[in-house]
Amino acid sequence: MLPLKEKDKPIVQKLLSAGCCARCILRFCCIRVQATYRRPQQVGPIRHTHTHTFAGLTVTRLPLREKGLVLDKDDIIPLKEAFKWIMQGLVSKELGGASALEVGVEFTHKETDADCHFLATVCPDCFKPAKNKQSVFTRMAVVKALEKISDVKFLRHFPCPPTQPSSCCSPQGVQCLHLSVFVAGRYNKFCRSLPQTPWLIDGERRMESSVEELIAAPVLSTFRAEGFNFSSSGREDVDVRTLGNGRPFAMELLNPHRSRLSRMEMKQLQQTINESSDKIRVRDLQIVTRDAMSRMKEGEEEKTKSYTALVWTRRPIQREDISFIGDIKELTLDQKTPLRVLHRRALAVRQRVVHSMNVHFLDPHHFHLRLKTQAGTYIKEFVHGDFGRTKPNLCELLRTDADILELDVESVDVDWPPAIPE
Amino acid sequence: MDGIEQKDTEEEAPSVIDRYYTRWYRADMKGKPCEDHCILQHSNRICVVTLAETHPILQSGRTIKSINYQISDGCSRLNNKVSGKSKRGGQFLTDFAPLCRITCTDETEYTIYSCIRGRLLEVNENILKTPTLLLERPSTEGYIAVILPKFEESKSITENLLSREEFESVVSKRNVAESQPS
């Protein structure tokens, strides 16, 4: 028994006369029972033997043709959903229920290629040419224009119901990729001349290697993956070390030919990475789920970080001169975007809090400054003042020129990923 | 942390400017004697306009009466607003675009110029509140403005500027000329 009701009858008849196929009729009637899509013959009470032609399937044209059929309904089943309900079971049966795969199918339909072009004359501001786009008619742009255009204007340019296509769309090919595997952990960086990501200018490498490449190499080969996306909870500069428990990171491994590793094997992989270089160290290496990536980015905005800086002062100082710094708590800074990153960041003033500090005197021109700060605080600029664009700054507090000679990250206070006992 | 080598207390580590900026100079800007400007160019191509140590404002114990960023009826550098990563909206400057006019207490007036082509990112409002910054720390807290040259022009803007050595030789020639018996 089909879940179509008496009230659906006029819709069904109109759609049938427009040449709509059985499955699309189900979609427009908002039928969510997946099984019905696999038995297209039974669009009762009217028996129907026409097979699905996937008319207007392609990405940009589909919203257009659906609008031509149904001007005002939000809960019709998207074509992609119906397609998946039909194909998923059949495909995994054929593959014998193997490992998780991502299957991509692409279709083109030359006949309706230019159908949506009229939208550019009616809503020109939706279709701005951009550098990397081949065609102005992207799905986003078409959907936006369809939302903007009034029903009256739409009907003037596009028939309702749309004309029946005379040809089928043609498949362009099928892509099979293994679902990505996500590996997370924490890394230490012991080298002051190692960037986090490869440093290239005009295609030329400026510095050898990088944290992400050193970690990725053994991981890629163990999982037999083709590529990776590396992401971490914040970053440190090339010349800054990351000590303590290290900084959380996560890597998406693309098209891995191996997706499962035992605890022992993960430990082995971690050891391999650690033995491959003395510049970095990895801990708590583990497989995580996709939503782990967002857990890690949380840390970037919200959590605190601790640092140790080696500070130089122009005027000679004594132990007593700097002891007051240890008493300063919750110091709010106004930091204009530092000049050293201003070429790639927007100009803005950011308020950041230095929660606490303490000092360790070394000699009349040097001391160690330990700080615990809000995420996103620019430490170097707090020390030297960045042309007075970070206020207050250490130069003002000490009433002398000051500079930062070395910086270490002592801790990134994010309690993710879960620690793995050694 | 690594131990530091024994440093002579008189010795200074290279400053932030030494480490990240190159000093370029424009001498006798617009033909006016000694009105020298120093452009600090960061390795990321951002430029900071400052007064060179030889500028008249910094000589003879002058003090500042006023600093005015309103350079014409229709244009105040204080109204400059940039937005987004690409710094849209910043006033575009050419070499001789005035940035501000400074009047000293001895009634001498000076105009400070951009010296390079580029987009104005910000002018230093701290010197409006505390003009002594300009006199005491002209190369750092007393900067005048921050300019972002076009990416394609970031190397060519220095073609019209003097390097530090060239500038020093210009200055020493002046001093010789002055000390020549007339």
Image: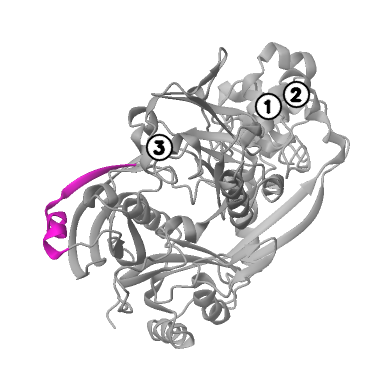
Q: Is there one chain holding both mark 2 and mark 1?
A: yes
From which residue to which does the magenta span run?
Answer: A318-334
What's the chain of the residue with tag 1? A
Is the residue under label 1 in contact with that under label 2 (CB below 8 Å)? yes
Q: Which mark is residue A119?
A: 2
**How packed is label 1: few (under 14 Cα within 10 Å), some, or many (20 or more)?**
many
Q: Which comes before the other along the chain, label 2 or label 1? A: 2
Q: Taking A363 as reference, is B37 left or right? A: right
- A328 drawn magenta: yes
Q: Which residue is at the front of the view, A390 or B17?
A: B17
Asked if A99 appears above or below A222 in the picture, the reply is above
Instruction: Where is residue A406? Give x, y as percent.
Output: 36, 67
What's the amino acid at mark 2? Leu
Q: Which mark is residue A126?
A: 1
**Which residue does the image show at 32% across and 51% down from the upper left?**
A382
Is the residue under label 1 in contact with that under label 3 (CB below 8 Å)? no
Q: Is residue A259 visible?
A: no
In the rendered view of the protein, which quadrant contains the C terminus of chain A?
A: bottom left
What's the chain of the residue with tag 3? B
